[in-house]
Amino acid sequence: MLEVHELVKTFGTLTAVDRLSLQIQDGQILGLIGQNGAGKTTTFRLILDFLNQDSGTVKWNGHELTDKDYNTIGYLPEERGLYPKLSIQDQLLYFAALRGKSKKEIEPKIDAWMEKFQVKGKKTDKVKSLSKGNQQKVQLIATLIHEPKLVILDEPFSGLDPVNAELLKNGILELKEQGSCVIFSSHNMENVEQICDHLIMLRNGQTVLNGSVQEIRESFGRTKLFLEAPVTRTELETIPGLHIVKEDNHRFELTLDHPEIGKEVFALATKQGYIPMFNQQPPTLEEIFKRKAGEQHE
């Protein structure tokens, strides 16, 4: 279990991380989101002891990280870094050796990991001969091949097409099933929404959202409504607090000033009986992200 309590880090007059607290149980995935400069990468570097905090604590299974613990950590930095003249195999063996793993332990696993992430090429190919996407996969394998118990991924989906992003999501979910603690940052809210157990959003180093994805969405109220019914735009516009976002042949996307308006919409839409669709839901995570990020400019 990873526990971070009241973590603070300043650079001169800038507070990069401001009293951040979080907890990740074994077998849980935490998403860390926020605009560029919000404090995500600084948080990762503080957890890994690459930076010294001004105050606060980081505990792994109840104690501060030791040299032995680092061998059970997998870290994918935002700034990718591979040795282009090494072969894929030599690259993976080198990084595994830094985590205390022998060639005998790692070499038999390389083919399976390359197949899992569909790396195009042979393990004897030099890294520089690979496409950017395949180089990224190799670095991800280097992060995971020693089977870490704590995995920190900084923008792992950056630059991946939808097919490869899906491979990565499956890989992260496998880590969860194996009991690893996973924390990752991403600007793709769809990926975050699909795989996270818990979510924290930072803005200027401060925590502005903290909870499960569903808890956070529900806290903003069910103010989105998708409707397909034999009603007209004119009829809908008679309901105060209702806003029509989109209309297409009796299909409407609506926003509501407050969730209770949904009852009035439902009564109007069903006055003639059955309707094909009435779906009232909270805003998406992406909409919430934009709303919370925009608050600093108000």
Image (spheres, helix red, strand yellow):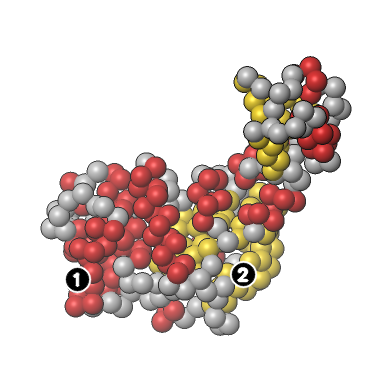
In this rendering, position of residue 205 left or right of residue 45? right
Indicate the secondary structure of the residue bearing disc 2.
Answer: strand
**Residue type, mark 1 in image:** Glu
Where residue 175 appears, as percent x and y from the top left, is 42, 67
Read off the residue under disc 2: 23
Badge 1 density bin: few <14, some 14–19, many ≥20, Cα 10 Å: some
Between 64 and 220, the one nearer to me in the picture: 220
Give the numbered dot on residue 107. Answer: 1
Q: Position of residue 150 (x, y in %)?
A: 46, 70
- Front residue of this view, candidates 168 and 5: 168
Q: Residue furthest left?
A: 124
Q: Position of residue 154 (x, y in %)?
A: 46, 55
Q: Quadrant of residue 161?
A: top left
| Quarter of the picture holding the C terminus | top right
Answer whether residue 128 is visible to the viewer in this image.
no
How many discs mark residues in the rendered view? Answer: 2
Front position in the image: 265 or 66: 265
Q: Residue at x 46, y 51 (%)?
A: 155
Of marks 2 and 1, which one's residue comes earlier in the chain?
A: 2
Quarter of the image for residue 253 reads: top right
The residue that appears at 36% across and 45% down in the rendered structure is: 163
Q: Using the rendered image of the protein, determine whether residue 92 is visible from the camera's viewpoint.
A: yes
Q: Secondary structure at mark 1?
A: helix
Q: Amino acid at mark 2?
A: Gln
Return the residue found at the far top.
234
Q: Residue at x 15, y 55 (%)?
A: 122
In the image, residue 134 lies at what x, y percent? 27, 48
